[in-house]
Image (spheres, rainbow, N blue to C red):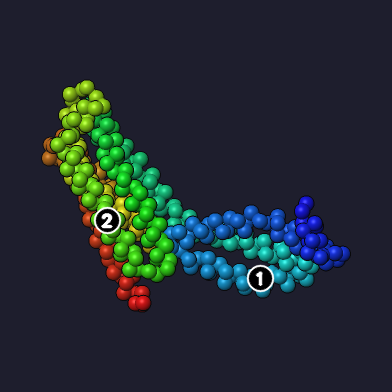
């Protein structure tokens, strides 16, 4: 509605105004795709992917060379559209760009989403094993993990910071900053979890008693929390390394680690410790300890190897 008035303010009249509106009405109709493309590109850049949009711009340049004259003058069954053809070419290229960028975003986000789904599967497997021993064990695990998660809450912010800063600096090829981010976040995360573990171990029974009066639940939950107090640091190493790898455009590593930590290893380790060694429910607690630390150490070594490889491939500044 404002288009004609705006163009008249700029001095457009007659056929010039008609051509201007012919072009701009189509462009305005396709504005959604311009906005979507910008939003998706911003998300990719936040993860350190600046090359996908560059590739899109290059492809868009050549598509313009093809589509502009084709749609403007017609041919191969397409009617001549004149000025409207140029506008339609622009919108079509934006549509193609949205789908291209969206596919790249899915390639980054899908493994992380599936990795989060494995967490639910892992909780189900742990609860399933505990249920064979006692309902008090299930209740103890539910309470104890909430206490454990409270201690882990401060590290969530560090995980997000690692993903964002690593992604940005990877896109800028500032590897020295990635090292700095990695070391700083790891240092603070481990310091908080060491302190948390030192507080949790002697207060395991006390904190359980805040939530239940059942002696059986308190005892079982306290046993879990004591093991958890020496497992906390492994979560910092594991999550920060996985988020770093996501920022380095290697999201599949987190998915494979999640499948190992949440599904494959628990099914084998829990059974072996709980029944094979006859440790009972304590075998599940120590199984969580062993599986989590093994996953954390693997990702730590793998993450260092990836950073070393990237350093070797990137020219020094």
Q: Is residue 254 visible?
A: no
Find residue 275 and name its label: none
Q: Which residue is mark 2?
A: 186
> Residue shown at 25%/58% (left/top)?
300
Residue 232 coordinates in the image, percent (x, y): 23, 46
Residue 204 coordinates in the image, percent (x, y): 18, 34
Front residue (pair 42, 216) = 42
Mark 2: few/some/many CA within 10 Å (<14, 14-19, 20+): many
Mark 1: few/some/many CA within 10 Å (<14, 14-19, 20+): some
User: How far apart are labels 2 and 1 at the CA level?
Assistant: 48 Å
Q: Secondary structure at mark 2?
A: helix
Mark 1 or mark 2, which is nearer the start of the sequence?
1
Closer to the observer: label 2 or label 1?
Answer: 2
Q: Is residue 244 visible?
A: yes
Drawn side of residue 223 relative to residue 263, left or right: left
Residue 160 coordinates in the image, percent (x, y): 38, 52
Q: Secondary structure at mark 1?
A: helix
Find residue 64 and name its label: 1
Which quadrant: the C terminus? bottom left
Front residue (pair 271, 144) = 144
Q: Is 147 situated above or below 95?
A: above
């Amino acid at each position: 509605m404002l288009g004609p008035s705006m163009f008249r303010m700029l001095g457009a009249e007659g056929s010039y105004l008609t051509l201007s509106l012919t072009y701009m009405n189509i462009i305005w109709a396709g504005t959604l795709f311009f906005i979507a493309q910008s939003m998706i590109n911003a998300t990719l850049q936040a993860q350190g992917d600046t090359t996908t949009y560059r590739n899109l711009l290059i492809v868009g340049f050549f598509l313009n060379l093809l589509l502009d004259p084709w749609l403007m003058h017609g041919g191969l069954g397409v009617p001549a559209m004149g000025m409207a053809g140029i506008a339609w070419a622009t919108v079509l290229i934006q549509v193609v760009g949205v789908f291209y960028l969206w596919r790249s975003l899915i390639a980054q986000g899908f493994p992380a989403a599936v990795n989060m789904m494995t967490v639910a599967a892992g909780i189900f497997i742990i609860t399933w094993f505990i249920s064979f021993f006692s309902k008090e064990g299930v209740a103890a695990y539910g309470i104890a993990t909430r206490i454990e998660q409270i201690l882990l809450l401060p590290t969530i912010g560090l995980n997000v910071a690692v993903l964002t800063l690593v992604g940005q600096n990877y896109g800028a090829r500032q590897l020295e900053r990635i090292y700095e981010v990695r070391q700083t976040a790891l240092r603070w995360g481990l310091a908080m979890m060491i302190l948390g573990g030192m507080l949790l171990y002697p207060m395991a029974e006390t904190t359980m008693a805040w939530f239940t009066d059942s002696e059986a639940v308190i005892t079982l939950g306290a046993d879990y929390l004591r093991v958890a107090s020496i497992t906390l640091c492994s979560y910092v190493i594991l999550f920060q390394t996985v988020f770093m790898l996501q920022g380095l455009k290697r999201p599949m590593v987190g998915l494979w680690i999640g499948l190992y930590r949440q599904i494959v290893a628990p099914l084998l380790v829990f059974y072996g410790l709980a029944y094979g060694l006859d440790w009972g429910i304590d075998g599940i607690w120590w199984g969580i300890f062993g599986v989590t630390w093994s996953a954390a150490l693997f990702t730590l070594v793998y993450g260092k190897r990836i950073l070393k490889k990237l350093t070797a491939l990137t020219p020094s500044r």
